[in-house]
Image (cartoon, grey):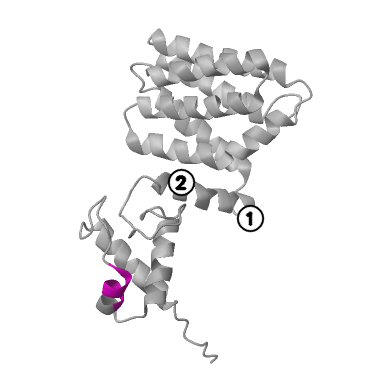
Amino acid sequence: MTISPVSRAPLSLEVAQRLRAAILDGTFPPDTELPTETELARSFGVGRSTVREAIRVLQAHGLLSGADTVSTARPRVTHERTADAAGLVLSTALQVGAIPLADLVALRVLLEAEAMRHVTAVPDAARSCLRAMAAAVESTDIRAFHTADVDFHVQLAYAGGNRALGFVIGVLRDCIAGYLLDALAALDDPGTVLVRLLAEHRAIVDALDAGDNDRAAALMVDHIRGFYEPEDASP
């Protein structure tokens, strides 16, 4: 019998897991500061450097503030960056080949079509995105169009009233946003494609305004597949 060495996770990860549990069970509610590094080190019986590493792990997971700033302020509990953290994990899985882009696109098709079936009113924010896309078409501003496009889909996803569905769609959009922008930039005639995409977005909104959610869902499916799976095999 072959006996393998016992694998021990770094102490900082154990501390991070215990802090995470304390955040999730409400011991440290949202927007409250964590105790000082010295206090945490004393509570866990570890060095301050271990606590510091554990805090960095939780900042990367979007549970603590301070990941994007250099500050002497103590980290605060936050839920504002959890979508960013989830998107980063999914994006990493995509980039290393653990999840094919085609699979994520297929998942988007299913989720966004379902979201359209539950939208009762198009939010003003989505209509603002349409106006921003129209302005971007006039100037053939690919980056501005891309930004408004991403936000348009997320706004409609949340309009269905299912926060979990909206959150997941938002994470998916963030994950493959770079691929969308690269595909638009690589087009020989981006202006023509932007005009078509804008028309497809408007048709989805028109269907929702008419109360025809099934048509909106079908249009959304065609819109997503038409971009990633065009008949001429262009990006």
Name the residue located 35 percent from the left edge and 72 percent from the top edge. Answer: 15
Magenta region:
36-41
Q: In this view, does 1 lie above or below 219?
A: below
- The image shows residue 179 at horizontal and vertical percentages of 64, 38
Residue type of the residue flagged with mark 1: Val
Q: Residue 47 carries which label?
A: none
Q: What residue type is labelled 2?
A: Asp
Q: Residue at x 71, y 15 (%)?
A: 192
Residue farthest front in this picture: 72
The residue under the point 63% across, 15% down is 137
Query: In this image, 183 relative to 108: left or right?
Result: right
Using the image as rendered, state which of residue 68 and residue 182 is in the foreground: 68
Left or right placement of residue 131 versus residue 212 in this view: right
Name which quarter of the figure residue 181 lies in.
top right
Residue 139 % position (x, y)? 66, 16
Query: Who is closer to the viewer here, 207 or 88?
Result: 88
User: Quarter of the image holding residue 133?
Assistant: top right
> In the rendered image, which quarter contains the C terminus?
top right
Secondary structure under the numbered disc 1 in the rendered image: loop
**Residue name at image x 30 percent, y 65 percent:** 19
Which element carries disc 2, helix, strand or loop? helix
- Residue 95 location (% of width, % of height): 63, 51
- Dot 2 corresponds to which residue? 84
Above or below: residue 37 compared with residue 111: below
Q: Dot 1 corresponds to which residue?
A: 96
How far separated are the C-alphas under marks 2 and 1?
18 Å
Q: Can residue 134 be seen in this view?
A: yes
Dot 1, how many residues are within 10 Å of its Cα: few (below 14), some (14-19), or many (20+)?
few
Residue 64 located within the stretch drawn in magenta: no
